């Protein structure tokens, strides 16, 4: 775990607010007003607490003129994946002085290159997944129910200290093996049937 100081140094984030402060902050931003959350809603702060520092902070907030520009995904209409974000962006009128821009292209570029640490973590996750699949396949011949095979996958993840999966496993036997994204794992495992 990083200390607040380490997290701030690595990320540049100096203050973290409770999520309930988002709406009042955005309302103040729309009106070009300074905003400070309730003290009990500041979860982490490395910002100076003096009144003079607060005035300086407010002056800086007023001086910030973010430039955003809404990009449509897909261009012809509303995106199913980013619907909430697109609707939020659409509420910012030209009169507000703000426009919204999607950061998706920036994140897409960042994902193109992986650091050595990211590659190592990805390989570790792949190795755990391979072991889980092999364990489930080896156990399948003695299983009576799909959930028993499913449990072998979950067991391997826990055994290797993986907190969660990147995608849920699908264990289906017989007709269930032909169901796209079947996740119930409640059917019987019968000899001679595809699993």
Image (spheres, grey):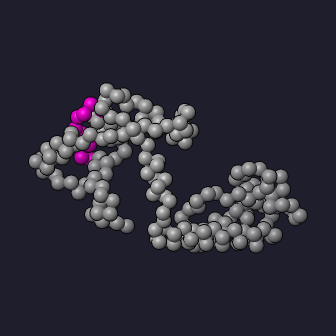
Residue pushed farthest right?
Answer: 192
Left or right, 189 with respect to 102, comes to: right
Main secondary-structure element of the magenta-colored stretch: loop
Residue 83 vs residue 100, the one in the foreground? 100
Image height check: is 58 above or below 16?
above
Res. 159 image quadrant = bottom right
In the picture shown, does residue 107 fall above or below 86? below
Image vertical order of residue 52 relative to residue 132, above or below: above
Residue 16 at what x, y percent from top left? 31, 51
Q: How many marks?
A: 0
Q: Choose top left, top right, bottom left or bottom right for residue 78.
A: top right
Residue plotted at (43% across, 37% down): 70
- 123 on left or right of 97: right
| Foreground pick, 91 / 151 | 91
- Magenta span includes 177: no
The residues colored magenta run: 30-40
Q: Is residue 20 above or below residue 50?
A: above
Tell me which residue sits at (56%, 71%) in the image. Answer: 123
Q: Quadrant of the N terminus?
A: bottom left
Q: Nearer the viewer, residue 76 or 22?
A: 76
The quadrant of the image that shows the C terminus is bottom right
Q: Position of residue 192 (x, y in %)?
A: 89, 64
Residue located 28% across and 52% down the image: 15
Query: Visible in this render: residue 60?
Result: yes
Q: Is residue 24 visible?
A: no
| Residue 9 position within the rendered picture, expressed as x and y whole percent measured from the top left | 29, 63
Q: From the top left corner, tell me how far across and down residue 108 is, in percent.
A: 49, 53
């Amino acid at each position: 775990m990083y200390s607040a100081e380490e997290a701030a140094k690595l990320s540049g984030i100096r203050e973290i607010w409770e999520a309930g402060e988002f709406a009042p902050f955005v309302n103040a931003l729309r009106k070009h007003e300074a905003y400070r959350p309730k003290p009990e809603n500041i979860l982490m702060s490395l910002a100076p607490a003096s009144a003079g520092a607060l005035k300086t902070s407010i002056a800086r907030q007023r001086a910030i003129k973010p430039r955003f520009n809404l990009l449509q995904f897909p261009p012809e209409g509303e995106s199913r994946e980013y619907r909430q974000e697109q609707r939020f962006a659409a509420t910012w009128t030209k009169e507000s002085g703000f426009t919204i821009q999607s950061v998706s292209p920036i994140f897409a570029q960042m994902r193109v290159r992986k650091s050595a640490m990211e590659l190592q973590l990805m390989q570790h996750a792949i190795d755990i997944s391979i072991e889980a699949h092999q364990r489930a396949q080896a156990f399948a011949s003695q299983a009576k129910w799909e959930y028993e095979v499913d449990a072998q996958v979950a067991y391997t993840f826990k055994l290797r200290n993986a907190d969660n999966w990147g995608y849920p496993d699908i264990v289906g036997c017989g007709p269930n093996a032909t169901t796209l994204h079947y996740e119930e794992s409640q059917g019987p495992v019968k000899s001679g049937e595809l699993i």
